[in-house]
Image (cartoon, coloured by chain):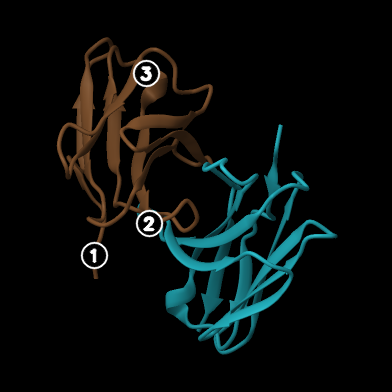
Chain colours: A cyan, B brown
Amino acid sequence: QKEVEQNSGPLSVPEGAIASLNCTYSDRGSQSFFWYRQYSGKSPELIMSIYSNGDKEDGRFTAQLNKASQYVSLLIRDSQPSDSATYLCAVRALQGNEKLTFGTGTRLTIIP
Amino acid sequence: EPEVTQTPSHQVTQMGQEVILRCVPISNHLYFYWYRQILGQKVEFLVSFYNNEISEKSEIFDDQFSVERPDGSNFTLKIRSTKLEDSAMYFCASSPTYNEQFFGPGTRLTVL
């Protein structure tokens, strides 16, 4: 069973601080990695994708991938109350295998 | 910005009845997906669809489920004989490639 693991939280971070969200995956052949944000009662919203080792920055968000450690993380700088949501890590395995495998998500609360 | 749309937003049905959930993917996307999320649980892959045929399906997607692209814009999920355990949020997603997947707002299915 290919798994994606996340700490369910809740993770509480003061407004303006850096929120750090982590994800590990079991399938060493995984190719593509995604972070989705899900507000309560809403659908997953894609915020970052990363495909190669290293860092990828987009605005206040930085995704980090380490395939050797099977670890992917998301940093949110200058956290805002609107960042309060559940963050889902999703992994796509082999080339040609299209499905995303999701973690259970980490609930993030930004404290004003 | 183009979005995936889904109808209805909420469907209530009796156990054993057939339901059809409808989706309009983003217009230039080629890959289409259905996922579901049981309340409080992770997002689970059901099926992917490309070039007018199923390209991958999960063990959840048994003979009670079917998908169809009846015209150039709609993508439907049919559940032939609903069970109580089919109660969930059903999300349609689409992708221009087989990487980044964009989710619709979901249909909440309640089976009584």
Residue B102 is situated, as x and y percent measured from the top left of the image, at 38, 56
Residue at mark 1: chain? B
Query: Which one is earlier in the sequence, the residue at label 3 or at label 1?
Result: 1
Label 1 amino acid? Answer: Pro
The residue identified by callout 2 is: B96
Query: Which one is earlier in the sequence, the residue at label 2 or at label 3?
Result: 3
Tell me if mark 2 has few (under 14), some (14-19) or many (20+) residues whose alpha carbon lies within 10 angstroms of its own.
Answer: some
Label 3 amino acid? Answer: Leu
Residue B96 is situated, as x and y percent measured from the top left of the image, at 37, 56
Is B70 left or right of A87, judged from the image as shown?
Answer: left
Tag 2 secondary structure: loop
Residue A99 is situated, as x and y percent measured from the top left of the image, at 52, 41
Query: Does label 1 lie on the same chain as label 3?
Result: yes
- What residue do we see at 65% from left, 58% from top? A9
Is A84 left or right of B104, judged from the image as shown?
Answer: right
The residue identified by callout 1 is: B2
The residue identified by callout 3 is: B84
* Rendered position, A87 above or below A91: below
Tell me if mark 1 has few (under 14), some (14-19) or many (20+) residues whose alpha carbon lies within 10 angstroms of its own.
Answer: few
